[in-house]
């Protein structure tokens, strides 16, 4: 090919690309739904979550592809379906979720979120969709040593940054806190003797001790203000709050939430 041949081919290619772009933007048919540059006619519902939390939300290879799954995700899919919207999932650090919500970067937070007075001031919270207790996770050899909350006084405790567990740990006399972004990082700290104990949601604790050798749940029972989970919505977004509560009521009456929890727990335990 001579010099001119190359240039004209290059020109043809760039013209082709430009045309392609233009078409994509004006293309309103359904086939483009799911693309990142989906046309504005497709309604999207963006949820923020910290996908480190089996069986609520976690990563799993499904059909060879890394996917975010869990019962919070199942619930989110129902909310989106009831609205006729496409669900978009954003995996974010737990401690950033409520700020992302207030700044409008996400539409809702579904992340095993516990209702607290402080959070209620910052965002709107849905009805409670599930309840669970808190648990203390330690190395197997320490199971009896940390059998009550009192024994955690002065201990090194690992918790998720921005969580209610961080507040629980702060309330323990002399406790030395290690606050980390992901639950898996806390588990690693436990395994490598950097912390003595961790406080986390019961179902999450169960999932981790099943999958990680050498860790157990003790008999200590941390108390919280409210042991339910809610969905966070930007303050004042009444329509979405109503829609979310409507779907939650439907799912509860159909017994779907318990079904989703059972399925997600089985999925979290499977290899
Ligand atoms: N329930 C606790 C809270 O609201 C912890 C939630 C952590 N969620 C997560 N997906 N890592 O503070």
Image (cartoon, rainbow, N blue to C red):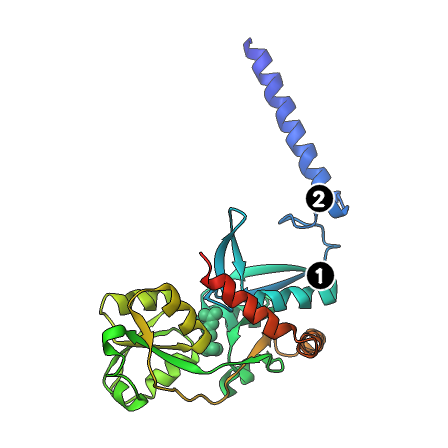
The residue beneath circle 2 is 25
Count of labels in the image: 2
**Residue 182 makes an appearance in the image:** no
Q: Is residue 81 left or right of residue 155?
A: right
**Residue 97 makes an appearance in the image:** yes
Check if mark 2's residue and mark 1's residue have beta carbons within 8 Å: no
**Crowding at mark 2 (Cα within 10 Å: few <14, some 14-19, many 20+):** few
Closer to viewer: mark 2 or mark 1: 1
Q: CA distance from mark 2 to mark 1?
A: 20 Å
The residue beneath circle 1 is 85
Res 147 quadrant in image: bottom left
Q: How far across and down, in percent of the image, does residue 214 sit?
A: 28, 68
Q: Nearer the viewer, residue 77 or 5?
A: 77
Q: Is residue 89 above or below residue 258?
A: above
Residue under the image location 72 percent in, 75 percent down: 239
Going from N to C along the chain, the mark reached first, 2 or 1, is 2
Q: Quadrant of the N terminus?
A: top right
Q: How far across and down, in percent of the image, does residue 113 sit?
A: 51, 76
Q: Is mark 1 within 8 Å of ligand 1?
A: no
Q: Quadrant of the C terminus?
A: bottom left
Q: How far across and down, in percent of the image, does residue 215 sit?
A: 31, 70
Kindly state the secondary structure of the residue where label 1 is placed: loop
Res 209 quadrant in image: bottom left
Q: Nearer the viewer, residue 49 or 8?
A: 49
Residue under the image location 61 percent in, 59 percent down: 88
Q: How far across and down, in percent of the image, does residue 11 sit?
A: 62, 22
Res 157 quadrant in image: bottom left
Residue under the image location 75 percent in, 48 percent down: 30
């Amino acid at each position: 090919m001579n010099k001119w041949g190359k240039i004209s081919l290059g020109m043809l290619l760039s013209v082709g690309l430009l045309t392609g772009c233009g078409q994509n933007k004006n293309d309103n048919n359904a086939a483009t739904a799911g693309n990142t540059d989906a046309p504005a006619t497709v309604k999207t519902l963006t949820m923020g979550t910290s996908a480190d939390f089996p069986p609520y939300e976690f990563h799993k290879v499904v059909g060879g592809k890394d996917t975010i799954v869990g019962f919070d995700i199942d619930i989110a899919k129902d909310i989106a379906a009831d609205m006729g919207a496409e669900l978009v999932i954003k995996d974010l650090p737990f401690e950033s979720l409520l700020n992302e919500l207030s700044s409008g970067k996400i539409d809702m937070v579904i992340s095993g979120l516990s209702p607290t007075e402080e959070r209620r001031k910052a965002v709107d919270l849905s009805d409670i969709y599930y309840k669970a207790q808190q648990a203390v996770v330690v190395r197997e050899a320490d199971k009896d040593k940390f059998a009550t909350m009192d024994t955690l006084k002065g201990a090194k405790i690992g918790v998720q940054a921005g969580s209610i567990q961080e507040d629980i740990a702060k309330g323990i006399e002399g406790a030395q806190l290690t606050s980390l972004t992901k639950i898996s990082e806390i588990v690693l700290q436990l395994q490598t003797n950097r912390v003595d104990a961790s406080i986390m949601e019961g179902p999450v604790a169960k999932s981790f001790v099943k999958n990680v050798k050498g860790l157990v749940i003790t008999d200590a029972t941390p108390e919280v203000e409210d042991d339910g989970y809610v969905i966070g919505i930007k303050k004042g977004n009444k329509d979405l709050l109503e829609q979310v509560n409507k779907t939650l009521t439907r799912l509860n009456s159909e017994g779907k939430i318990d079904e989703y929890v059972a399925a997600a727990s089985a999925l979290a335990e499977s290899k």
